[in-house]
Image (tube, rainbow, N blue to C red):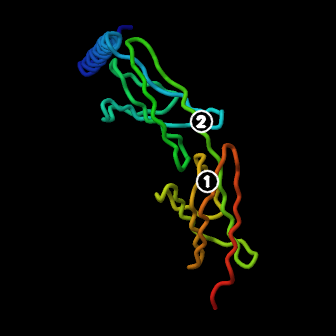
């Protein structure tokens, strides 16, 4: 039994073969370019000594040229770069800068270490759990607004808090978070106005 191709099928096969040849050609050409002057840069991140998720930006002369996720190297032209590494899910000083040099055919991925703790604000009113908003600041800068009752990861350091519940406010001036600590602070408010 003999199979014949319709003109449409033949045209489809020719298109597929042309596309495959072109893709192989581009892959070979791209490999040659990479080998001639590109290196890999990236990072590994530890939070309190354990691997952690983070992202990074690649800067050259102060301008961002690329970005990625730590643990996955990026290809860049040979040269000196600054990596801005940001620890995921952490407030405070969760950014570090590291200098790296990309060399043809080589990979450079320094290990960046962070230290964090956890803060939980529990608010009560007349002895019963209540809701509140927490304004988190450090060094005179407002960092975030949080909800009481929700634990938040913070970079090690000293913070100021303003807790507000039903129009009443409480100030906590110097709350220090240390490495690996889970700090729970209770804030009591009086009876609501009648």
For residue 81, side relative to residue 135 (left or right): left
Image quadrant containing the N terminus:
top left
Residue 173 pos. (x, y %): 59, 63
Say which residue appears at 61% left-offset and 65% top-offset: 172
Above or below, comparing residue 193 to residue 29 in the picture: below
Q: Distance between the residues labelled 2 and 1?
A: 16 Å
Residue 82 pos. (x, y %): 39, 30
Say which residue appears at 32% left-offset and 29% top-offset: 60
Above or below, comparing residue 131 to residue 99 in the picture: below
Q: Nearer the viewer, residue 105 or 174?
A: 174
Q: To which quarter of the image does residue 31 belong?
A: top left
**On the image, numbered disc 2 is attached to which residue?**
52
Q: Nearer the viewer, residue 61 or 35?
A: 61
Image quadrant containing the C terminus:
bottom right
Above or below, comparing residue 184 to residue 18 in the picture: below
Q: To which quarter of the image does residue 18 belong?
A: top left
Q: To which quarter of the image does residue 76 belong?
A: top left
Say which residue appears at 65% left-offset and 55% top-offset: 119
Dot 1, how many residues are within 10 Å of its Cα: few (below 14), some (14-19), or many (20+)? Answer: some
Q: Which residue in the rendered view is the most extreme toward the right? A: 127
Residue 3 pos. (x, y %): 35, 11
Do labels 2 and 1 touch, CB within 8 Å? no
**Mark 1: secondary structure:** strand
**Mark 2: secondary structure:** loop
**On the image, numbered disc 1 is attached to which residue?**
152
For residue 61, side relative to residue 149 (left or right): left
Residue 96 pos. (x, y %): 48, 37
Say which residue appears at 32% left-offset and 32% top-offset: 65
Q: Which of 114 and 27 is in front in this view?
A: 114
């Amino acid at each position: 039994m003999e199979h014949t191709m319709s003109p449409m099928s033949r045209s489809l096969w020719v298109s597929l073969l042309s596309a495959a040849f072109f893709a192989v050609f581009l892959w070979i050409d791209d490999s040659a370019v990479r080998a001639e002057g590109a290196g890999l840069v990236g990072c590994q991140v530890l939070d309190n000594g354990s691997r952690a998720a983070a992202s990074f930006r690649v800067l050259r002369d102060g301008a961002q040229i690329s970005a990625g996720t730590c643990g996955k190297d990026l290809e860049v032209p040979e040269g000196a770069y600054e990596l801005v590494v940001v620890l995921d899910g952490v407030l405070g000083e969760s950014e570090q800068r590291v200098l790296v040099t990309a060399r043809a055919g080589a990979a450079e991925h320094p290990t960046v270490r962070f230290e964090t703790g956890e803060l939980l604000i529990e608010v009560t009113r007349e002895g019963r759990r209540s809701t509140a908003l927490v304004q988190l600041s450090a060094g005179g800068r407002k960092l975030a607004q949080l909800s009481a009752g929700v634990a938040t990861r913070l970079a090690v350091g000293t913070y100021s808090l303003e807790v507000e519940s039903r129009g009443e406010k409480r100030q906590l001036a110097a709350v220090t978070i240390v490495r690996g600590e889970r700090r729970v602070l209770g804030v009591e408010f009086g009876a609501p106005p009648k």
